[in-house]
């Protein structure tokens, strides 16, 4: 311990200087805390625990940082050759010091592990939920099924491609406030209820990630994983897919709206009318409009199809139908599109294995018929015939 | 020793003009110095290839919206950037150092298997060509992130198969290199060079080589299963056929986590040579440094689950992997404290290698803190796959692995070439790198905390400011590295003559027992070190 004497002798002044310096660096950072330099404000008991844990560990790390960097920079300034420092070549071993700086970090780690363990156990306790929602991820959006309420619906990005743009093609519309964080049909849950999520996937691995609710859970095809949250206030909470899942990974946001119990009950009633999945109707009508019965005119179908195309197809096959070959083939001039309708229905319903072309069976018969009519009668394609919802229906198993 | 040099016909002067022509020499050389240099030049080229991809990524992320590349090309860029940097830049660079330094530091004439040495270098060329060519085949390069998770990766085209084959070849090359290194260290030490007298660089490489031999075959098995899933109808990772995508993650990360230490342990070795040399004092706690390195290596096998806290593993699994991961902080802390204690009561000067070494110490410590934050399961769950993770691993890999490599190049260049690099250019290189690195990556902590996922080509408006700053930093950082190339090049071409012992306190064998520049053939008769003072 002879070796530690210089620290004590000159330590006090240095300590003060370093502490003031570091405090000066930290203070503005903390003042900025609301401007996206930290975890967003928690909205559930678990995310509150996570927030607290992070701050606690951050402060412990800051304390260690101050000590380690003080010692390092003290050495750098004090023992400079240019100031005539002479090396103490015999100071190169001390079992006691080694034991101390092995034991102290170990104790600090225990102090970190204890509260972390408690939170882990709380997070994993998915027992006695007030309600359950099944979350199915697909390329590239989400489906929410409320089993008890008999509601099921899809939730897709609602930011138009005209705000996003493409390389070489400037966005034609100004980016909105919720750019890339807005969806057509948000998930809705009641406040102060334990909501259990059953997360799975339809194709590749995705991640259902809403930081303010303290949830980040992979959806793994073929497996169901459960996780829970309890929103502690009414509001809108945003998240995104957290696991790379292909081309449009950056374009599958999550929105959760937390409502009061009465408002939630109203929502369930309305949603039940639009999106009932009780009769096993996987393909429900979009956005609440009742679908017209019977055959439609080509122009009507084409107009409907253009909208479907803009939501589901345009990212890969492009607005001009030219695609991005070879990964995303052109539809304009395509033999499959202009040929017999069965082949096209088959691809839309089943996807094309081994490629990024996924199944679009989740769209309604009418939507599929409309988008096929659109592709058959746009760009260089001029088939002149419409595809009717009944054609698609006949092909569904 | 002629039997091991395989250059028995050469004269003893390596710079003779009667040997093979330059092309024949490049293809057929079995000399550890030639092969070491080839590894280092190769890795430098790959460093700029991978860096170019990084700049394309940052250019796309400069503003929200899509401006530079299509989303799927963006995904390929992030995937191949990682593979190139790991397998093409950092690992070969450390093997280059191993080739140059291990025989010199243990008093051997060459590596144990000189022809295999040549082969393990040349295998990397077709592998790299395959990897880079995958950008130009139908379907493009692998676009699943470097972790190649199925089922996403099974959607890819032939580019994925080319990537798998490239990784197989690179893995074979690494395994051969490691066998060579282990055999050389265990069998060819000069008399008196006991294991506990070896320089730390040799020790760290001995441990790293064992890690490589242990985990590269695991990776090979893992990607072979991918290949058969893709083409031969197996269902290892396909739930519809009774498989499990999660199993891929377990196998991949059983390789992947030790791999992280493969990238950093030799860097620890280089640090343990440079810091004592410029502190003019022996390394503090040599024995504990050896034990700490071994502990880190052993622990690295039982922490892979911390990459998978969000798959939904049981609480017991999460807790086990959290505790094991936290434990790694202990030996890592020991190393940091030992380096600081080495500087304590030393006589420090700040030539370029030492600047990079101190930069390493500071930045690696910060990367360690963010690693500790990420080890805590609940915090990891909210930060998993966000930019916080991107910031964390770039803090430990860029100023960790890559600055250690650069420090090593500046440190040994005078010994290797007999010429001195430009000290002022080196300092410019360091300060520009240090400042721009932090401009690039420090804001990424904020982005991650605020919830920005990684692997996305476009982002919400709330992330715009920090991304713009990060991109500006990245371009300064990228272009600053050209100073390094210029400095190395001009040193070799026209640098001032280096001193016989450029760093007077560097005390491993290459400094104490060999002339400057090191002759083409060294230690044809091993030095007798019995009874000599230990040199760490």
Image (cartoon, rainbow, N blue to C red):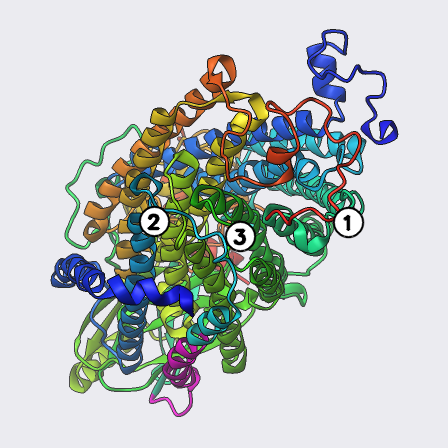
Q: Kindly identify which numbered label has been placed on residue A79.
A: 2
Q: CA distance from mark 1 to mark 3?
A: 43 Å
The residue under the point 69% across, 46% down is B532
Give yes or no for residue A109 being in the magenta stretch. Answer: yes
Q: Where's the N terminus of chain A, which quadrant?
A: bottom left
Q: Where is residue B461 drawn, in percent x and y?
A: 20, 49
* Upstream in sequence: badge 1 or badge 3: 3
Residue B387 percent location from the top left of the image? 34, 54
A326 or A378: nearer the viewer: A326
> Secondary structure under badge 2?
loop
Q: Are marks 2 and 1 on the same chain?
A: no
Q: Nearer the viewer, mark 3 or mark 2?
A: 2
The answer to whether residue A117 is magenta is: yes
Kindly indicate whether the residue at mark 2 contacts the one at mark 3 (C-beta within 8 angstroms): no
Can you say whether B259 is above or below A212 in the image?
A: above
Which residue is identified by label 1?
A: B186
Q: CA distance from mark 3 to mark 2?
A: 55 Å
| SS for callout 1 | helix
Above or below, B328 against A146 in this view is: above
Report the front residue among B257 and A244. Answer: B257
Placement of B270 over or under B334, stated as above or below: above
Q: CA distance from mark 2 to mark 1?
A: 38 Å
Closer-to-camera residue (B340/A313): B340
Bounds of the magenta segment: A106-130
């Amino acid at each position: 311990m002879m070796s530690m004497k210089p620290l004590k002798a000159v330590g006090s002044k240095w300590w003060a200087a370093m502490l003031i310096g570091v405090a000066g660096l930290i203070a503005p950072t903390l003042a900025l805390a609301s401007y996206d330099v930290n975890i967003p404000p928690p909205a559930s008991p678990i995310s509150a625990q996570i927030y607290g844990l992070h701050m606690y560990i951050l402060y412990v790390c800051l304390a260690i940082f101050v000590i380690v960097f003080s010692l390092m920079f003290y050495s750098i300034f004090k023992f400079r050759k240019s100031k005539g420092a002479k090396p103490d070549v015999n100071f190169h071993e001390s079992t006691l010091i080694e034991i101390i700086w092995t034991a102290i970090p170990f104790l600090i780690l225990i102090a970190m592990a204890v509260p972390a363990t408690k939170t882990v156990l709380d997070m994993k306790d998915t027992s006695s939920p007030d309600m359950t929602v099944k979350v199915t991820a697909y390329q590239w959006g989400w489906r929410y099924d409320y089993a008890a309420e008999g509601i099921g619906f899809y939730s897709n990005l609602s930011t138009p491609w005209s705000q996003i743009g493409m390389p070489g093609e400037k966005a034609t519309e100004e980016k909105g406030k919720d750019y890339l964080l807005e969806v057509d049909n948000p998930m809705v849950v009641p406040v102060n209820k334990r909501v259990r999520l059953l997360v799975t996937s339809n194709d590749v691995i995705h991640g259902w990630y809403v930081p303010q609710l303290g949830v980040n859970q992979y959806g793994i095809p073929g497996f169901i994983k459960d996780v829970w949250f309890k929103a502690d206030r009414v509001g809108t909470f945003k998240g995104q897919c957290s696991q790379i899942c292909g081309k449009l990974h950056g374009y599958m946001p999550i929105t959760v709206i937390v409502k009061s119990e009465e408002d939630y009950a109203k929502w369930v009633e309305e949603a039940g009318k639009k999106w009932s999945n009780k009769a096993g109707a996987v393909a429900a009508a979009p956005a609440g409009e009742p679908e017209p019965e019977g055959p439609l005119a080509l122009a009507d179908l084409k107009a409907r199809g253009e909208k479907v195309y803009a939501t589901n197809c345009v990212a890969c096959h492009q607005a001009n139908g030219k695609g991005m070959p070879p990964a995303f083939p052109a539809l304009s001039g395509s033999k499959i599109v202009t040929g017999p309708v069965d082949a096209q229905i088959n691809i839309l319903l089943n996807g094309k294995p081994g490629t990024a072309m996924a199944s679009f069976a989740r769209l309604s018969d009418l939507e599929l018929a409309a988008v096929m009519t659109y592709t058959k009668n746009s760009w260089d394609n001029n088939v002149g015939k419409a595809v009717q919802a009944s054609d698609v229906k006949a092909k569904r198993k | 020793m002629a039997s091991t040099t395989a250059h028995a016909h050469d004269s003893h002067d390596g710079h003779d003009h009667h040997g093979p022509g330059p092309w024949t020499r490049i293809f057929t050389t079995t000399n550890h110095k030639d092969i070491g240099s080839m590894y280092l030049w190769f890795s430098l080229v790959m460093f700029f290839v991978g860096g170019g991809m990084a700049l394309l990524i940052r250019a796309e992320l400069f503003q929200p919206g899509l401006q530079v590349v299509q989303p799927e090309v963006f995904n390929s860029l992030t995937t191949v950037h990682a593979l190139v940097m790991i397998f093409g830049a950092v690992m070969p660079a450390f093997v280059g150092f191993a080739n140059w330094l291990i025989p010199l530091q243990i008093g051997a004439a060459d590596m144990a298997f000189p022809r295999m040495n040549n082969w393990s270098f040349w295998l990397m060329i077709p592998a790299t060509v395959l990897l880079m060519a995958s950008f130009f085949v139908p379907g493009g390069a692998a676009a699943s992130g470097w972790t190649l998770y199925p089922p996403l990766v099974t959607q890819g085209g032939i580019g994925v198969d080319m990537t798998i084959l490239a990784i197989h070849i690179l893995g074979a090359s690494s395994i051969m290199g490691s066998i060579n290194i282990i055999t050389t260290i265990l069998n060819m030490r000069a008399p008196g060079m006991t294991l506990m007298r070896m320089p730390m660089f040799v020790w760290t490489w001995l441990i790293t080589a064992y890690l490589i031999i242990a985990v590269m075959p695991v990776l090979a098995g893992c990607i072979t299963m991918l290949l058969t899933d893709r083409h031969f109808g197996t269902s290892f990772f396909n739930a519809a056929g009774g498989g499990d995508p999660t199993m891929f993650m377990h196998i991949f990360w059983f390789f992947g986590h030790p791999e992280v230490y493969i990238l950093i342990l030799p860097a620890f070795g280089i640090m343990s040579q440079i810091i004592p040399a410029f502190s003019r004092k022996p390394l503090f706690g040599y024995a504990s440094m050896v034990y700490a390195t071994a502990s880190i290596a052993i622990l690295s096998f039982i922490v892979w689950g911390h990459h998978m806290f969000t798959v939904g593993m049981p609480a017991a699994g999460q807790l086990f992997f959290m505790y094991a991961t936290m434990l790694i902080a202990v030996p890592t802390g020991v190393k940091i404290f030992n380096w600081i204690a080495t500087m304590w009561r030393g006589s420090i000067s700040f030539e370029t290698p030492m600047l990079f070494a101190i930069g390493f110490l500071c930045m690696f410590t910060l990367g360690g803190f963010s690693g500790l934050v990420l080890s805590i399961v609940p915090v990891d769950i909210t930060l998993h796959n966000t930019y916080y993770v991107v910031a964390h691993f770039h803090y430990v890999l860029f100023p960790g692995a890559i600055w250690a490599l650069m420090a090593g190049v500046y440190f040994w260049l005078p010994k290797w070439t007999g010429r001195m690099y430009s000290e002022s250019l080196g300092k410019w290189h360091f300060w520009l790198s240090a400042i721009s690195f932090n401009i690039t990556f420090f804001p990424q902590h904020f982005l991650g905390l605020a919830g920005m996922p990684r692997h996305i080509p476009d982002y919400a408006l709330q992330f715009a400011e920090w991304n713009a700053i990060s991109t500006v930093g990245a371009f300064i950082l990228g272009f600053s590295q050209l100073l390094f190339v210029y400095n190395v090049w001009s040193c070799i071409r026209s640098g001032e003559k280096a001193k016989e012992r450029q760093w007077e306190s560097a005390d491993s064998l290459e400094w104490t027992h060999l002339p400057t520049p090191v002759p083409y053939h060294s230690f044809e008769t091993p030095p007798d070190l019995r009874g000599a003072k230990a040199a760490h």
